[in-house]
């Protein structure tokens, strides 16, 4: 059975809905590959969290639909939608908080959160 994960992200009035499924690490935003989506600044903004956690999308394709808001709001909503499930867990605000910190501190925070979610001995009531 193929595991498909849905995630969402918001920034101001922009809303992004991501569908993550097994694949080759491709990212499509509104059916456009990330490599040619928007401007270079927007692509860098979306790709930043993926550079902090390099293996975040290994073996996973992300199909993201984004609407509302402006270009930068959409970019932040997209990056939140992708990283929430892959490197930050369950849609916590900590994903966004981590990227507002200096890079080493943000990576340390994300790794600590990821360790908790991946630890089988931790259960949620």
Image (cartoon, grey):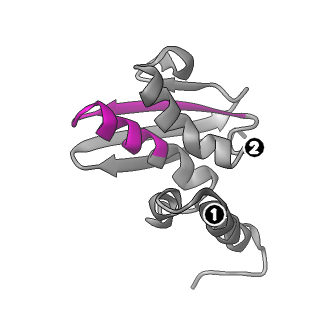
Could you tell me which residue is drawn at 69 percent across and 71 percent down?
112
Residue 88 position in % (x across, y down):
58, 60
**Is 15 placed left or right of 109 in the picture?**
left
Could you tell me which residue is drawn at 23 percent across and 33 percent down?
70
Crowding at mark 1 (Cα within 10 Å: few <14, some 14-19, many 20+): many
Residue 27, quarter of the rendered image:
top right
Which quadrant of the rendered structure holds the C terminus? Answer: bottom right
Pick out the residue farthest to the front: 102
**Is 55 placed left or right of 87 in the picture?**
right
Q: Distance between the residues labelled 1 and 2?
A: 13 Å
Could you tell me which residue is drawn at 42 percent across and 48 percent down?
8
Vertical arrangement, residue 75 with respect to residue 107, above or below: above
Marker count (numbered) = 2
**Is 28 placed left or right of 107 in the picture?**
left
Residue 97 position in % (x across, y down):
46, 64
**Is 13 placed left or right of 6 in the picture?**
left
The tag on residue 55 is 2
Residue 83 position in % (x across, y down):
55, 49
Could you tell me which residue is drawn at 61 percent across and 57 percent down?
103
Q: Does the magenta stretch include residue 43?
A: no
**Which range is magenta?**
60-79
| Element at label 2 | loop
The tag on residue 110 is 1
Near-viewer residue (88 or 23): 88
Pick out the residue farthest to the bottom: 125
Q: Does the magenta stretch include residue 62?
A: yes
Crowding at mark 2 (Cα within 10 Å: few <14, some 14-19, many 20+): few
Which quadrant of the rendered structure holds the N terminus? Answer: top right
Q: Which of marks 1 and 2 is nearer the N terminus?
A: 2
């Amino acid at each position: 059975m193929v595991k498909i994960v849905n995630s969402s992200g918001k920034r101001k009035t922009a809303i992004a809905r991501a569908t993550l499924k097994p694949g080759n690490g491709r990212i499509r935003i509104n059916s456009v590959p990330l490599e040619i989506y928007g401007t270079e600044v927007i692509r860098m903004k979306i790709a930043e969290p993926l550079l902090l956690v390099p293996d975040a999308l290994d073996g996973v394709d992300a199909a993201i639909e984004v609407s509302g808001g402006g270009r930068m709001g959409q970019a932040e909503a997209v990056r939140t939608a992708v990283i929430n499930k892959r490197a930050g867990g369950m849609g916590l605000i900590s994903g966004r908080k981590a990227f507002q910190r200096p890079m080493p501190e943000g990576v340390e925070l994300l790794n600590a959160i990821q360790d908790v979610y991946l630890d089988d001995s931790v259960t949620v009531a």
